[in-house]
Each structure stands twice: as structure tokens, then as C-alpha cells.
Image (cartoon, rainbow, N blue to C red):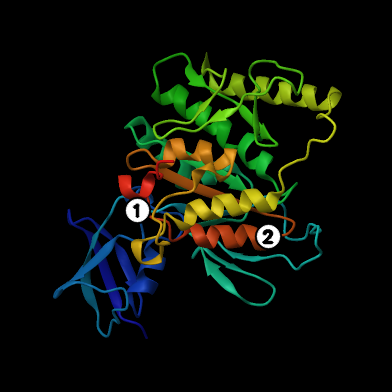
Amino acid sequence: MAPILTVSLVSGEELGRFSASNVENLKRQLFALPRSGCLRQADPKSTQLVGKDGVLSEWQIFTEDQDLQILLAPRKHAISVLLRCQPPSAPCADERAPLVLDTVHGLVTDAQGKSIELDYVFDEADGSMLFMELWEDILLQSLKGRRALLLAYGAADSGKMQGIFGENGLVLKTHEFLQAHVRASFVAVEFIELVTEKAYDLLAGETTWEHQHPVHYSQDQVTLEGVQPRPIDVSTAMLLGLANRHERDRYISPKEGSTIIPDQKIFWAISQVLRQLLPDGKRRHTRCIPYRESAVTMLMSNVLRSISPQLVVLGTDGGDTERTLRLLKQVRGCLLVADEKTNGEEQE
């Protein structure tokens, strides 16, 4: 039987007693869902445990009952999330067996029995749990000046729109949060759609494909030509933008000869950026981040080049999830730190 470990905060508050044989297993239990308030804001990778002989290594094995202290570290790593928006019984586009999700330990197992560990795994598309466990704390940090980026990635019709823009999605949850925490009656909002590497302003009511806004990259800030944030509440912006998008797509087709940028190219561009956010030992020798490979990554750079950015990559389980899991696995190692040598790009 594994030893009983009593874990307390530095303040002396006891978090509980756990049966674990090593530090890795103990951390999994501590950071299992649902997480308490103080643990939700901590980074599991950087958090340390302290015993009678000092800080414990990640491979420490417990042989006896003991009291431990936990030194919570603020989040510095990107956060990987898998969200199941369809029931496991729903037919998959590629007819593969559904993934097995362990929401307690953040484990995802495929039909071959291979498992990967993520920061969060949710077995339903209800935005309430996702908001409570993760996104609310991200927003609280944003009000203190830390910029945040949420990237939803997944196959077509896998539930991205539902999870973000649905009736109980993160956009409306964010709207409710801002109403409760920000005194201003509105915020500055942009709502952009990218098609063939060009941006379209969904809040401008532009109904032709000719109204496109080039993306301009610079060392300091990426801008969209002709697009300005609008003073409007988030809920109204979402409804207006989605309505304009639907109206444009209903009556107008892209110019002949235009092609949608293949998903493989976007995946590759995002993957290249994430690779350069890995700790020093895993980075390529160039140490510059290739933001300019895609309009998507150029816009991501406005957040990722800021001080202490927050990055959440939300993958959706539906269709072919192999690429989604590859991306989420890569996210797990990304370290977000303010470092001009690694967050900047080489001058041309």
C-alpha cells in the first residue's frame, strides 16, 4: 500500500491527504479536476513539493507517511485542452474508434491503447466547466495586464464553433464575466475572419470578398489595414459578426481561382511557432520564431511577444483527431517567458 502524504500550502492550510508512491502520481492527484481555487492558478509543471530534506525531485519515490508542503508556481507554460463536443457514440467521419478520455488525470487514449497526458480533458461541450476550471482565471490575469490567446483547433464539424460561439460557449461566458468585473458599458472588440490569408472585418457589414484587409507584420505590432476596434459589448459583437459572416457566405462566393489555404499549411505554421517556445534544450539553433509563415501566426504574435503571455490551445474531439492530438502534445512543453532573444524575430 502506498504511503499517506499530507500536503499543505506554505500558509499552513491543509489541502488533503493522498496515497501516492511518487511525486508524479501525487501531482496528478493534486491537479485532478475539479481543482481548488489556488491550484487552478498554478502551473503543475513548475510547482514543487518540499519534504523534510528539501525540495523533492520529479522522480522521488515515497516509502513512508510524511508531511509535505507545496510551492505553487504561476503559470508559465502553454495550456493544452481537449474538449469532446460530440458523444462517444456519435459516428466519426473517419470511422475510427472514439477516444477514451480520463477527465480526472487528463489522459487521452486512442484505439491502439496509446495515451498522452494533457493539462485538461473535458468530456462534454458545456462551457460552464471549461470556464470555471480554466478560462475564468485566464480572464482575471488579463485584467491585471497579461494578454491571453485561445486557439481552437480541430477537424471541420468537430465542435469548435459550438465550444467558442455556442449558447453556452466561451464568448458568452466572457461577456458575462466582463459585465460583472468591468465597470465600462462596452469594450473594444475586433471580429475577424481569415480566408486565403486575407482578413475580413465581420463587424463592418462588408458583404463582398473584395473588402479584404491585408495583415502587416512588424517587429512591434501586427496590424490589419483599415480595421479598428469598435466600442461594443462582446455579446452584441458576436451576434453581429456571425450574422454578417452568414449573410456574406450565403450570397457571395470567393473569386474564381482563389483557393482556401490547406489545413496542412496552417498546422505546419502553428507547429513551427510552438516548437520555438519549447525549453532551450529542445529549440532549434535559430532561436527566432517564424511568425510570418501564416496570417494566423502573425496575429498570434501580438500576444505571444508580450510580457508573460497566456496561451490556451483548445483541441476538439471529432473527425480525424490525430493531428489535433499531435498539436496538443506539442503545446504541453511550451514555455511562455518574456525573452527578446526568443520571442523576437531576426531583422530582415
Please tell me which of labels 1 and 2 falls first in the chain. Answer: 1
Q: How many marks?
A: 2
What crowding class fits label 1: few (fewer than 14 Cα within 10 Å), some (14-19), or many (20 or more)? some
Query: Relative to residue 262, is residue 103 drawn left or right?
Result: left
SS of the residue at dot 1? helix
Which x, y percent locates residue 240?
Answer: 67, 19
**Tag 2: residue type?**
Thr
Q: Mark 1 points at which residue?
A: 39
Q: Residue at x 33, y 43 (%)?
A: 308
Q: Is residue 220 left or right of residue 103?
A: left
Tell me which residue sits at (75%, 24%) in the image: 209
Q: Position of residue 64 (x, y in %)?
A: 25, 83
Relative horizontal placement of residue 92, taking residue 232 as reference (left or right):
right
User: In this view of the protein, can residue 154 be seen by the observer?
Assistant: no
> Residue tagged by mark 2?
321
Query: Are there few (<14), some (14-19), or many (20+) residues within 10 Å of tag 2?
Result: many
Residue 110 percent location from the top left of the image: 66, 70
Pick the front one: 286 or 50: 286
- Image quadrant for the N terminus? bottom left
| Percent position of residue 292, x then y | 53, 42
Provide the secondary structure element on which disc 2 rests: loop
Q: Who is closer to the viewer here, 124 or 290? A: 290
- The answer, for residue 290, to whether it is visible in the render is yes
Q: In which quarter of the image is the C terminus?
A: top left
> What residue is drawn where x is 43% and y is 38%?
303
Q: Distance between the residues labelled 1 and 2?
A: 29 Å
Q: Which amino acid lies under the numbered mark 1 shown in the image of this protein? A: Leu
Q: Which mark is residue 182?
A: none
Quadrant of the image occupied by residue 293: top right
